Amino acid sequence: DTEVTQTPKHLVMGMTNKKSLKCEQHMGHRAMYWYKQKAKKPPELMFVYSYEKLSINESVPSRFSPECPNSSLLNLHLHALQPEDSALYLCASIQGEMGAGGATGELFFGEGSRLTVL
Amino acid sequence: EDQVTQSPEALRLQEGESSSLNCSYTVSGLRGLFWYRQDPGKGPEFLFTLYSAGEEKEKERLKATLTKKESFLHITAPKPEDSATYLCAVQEWDNAGNMLTFGGGTRLMVKP
């Protein structure tokens, strides 16, 4: 069983809607990630939060807005999305020792939120 | 730029037919190589981490090995429940934020 919990599991939204994806972990991990995965493709990194601060933004369009309210929670706010944004959105956190170069260790993924934009 | 290539893209096996999946990588300094299993519509499930050439790890019917240029995931006497996509990913020492560079995956189908 994964210890990274994502909600909702499925989301259907129109291009004018505003919605949010949520992620929660209680393993004490200090780095959390958002990935996007299209069918039959590997996950693509979107954002990295380290100690609740945004450390990496992989040139993601502003219609995706991440938020890290505390060390256990990670949100992804969605607004004015396009149909091509339909994908599986994965949250992950990293176990391991935090050092100058970031944490070393395994990334643990949630089950994902399947987003469909109509 | 990091490169991770997995082969084959798809593999069909009969139950009990052992085989290997390959992950070739090009990085300036390997921090870790990770294997994940992913079922359709689910998040990747962590399997193994390998840190240095010569290292091997086993879990049930799976065994992962690492050389300086590639990693193999050996599947011994697979069962239908081993059917999934297997992803490998590498982490580089110069990599801020611990980004993983994923390979394209191998879709494994094991028929009874």
Image (cartoon, coloured by chain):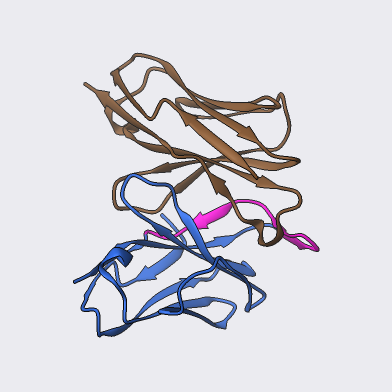
Q: Which residues are magenta?
A: A97-111
The structure residue drawn at horizontal position 48% and vertical position 31%, both measured from the top left corner, is B6
Residue A16 placed where, x, y %? 25, 85
Residue B106 placed where, x, y %? 40, 33
Q: Taking B56 as reference, is A114 above or below it?
A: below
Pick the quarter of the image with the N terminus of chain A.
bottom left
The structure residue drawn at horizontal position 61% and vertical position 27%, both measured from the top left corner, is B70
Q: Is residue A87 left or right of residue B48?
A: left
Q: Is residue B65 visible?
A: no
The structure residue drawn at horizontal position 21% and vertical position 78%, both measured from the top left corner, is A14
Q: Is residue A82 left or right of residue A36?
A: left
Shown in brown, the chain is B
Q: Is residue A67 visible?
A: yes
Q: Is residue B18 magenta?
A: no
Q: Is residue A101 magenta?
A: yes
Pick the quarter of the image with the C terminus of chain A.
bottom left
Which of the two residues, A11 or B29, is positioned nearer the viewer here?
A: B29
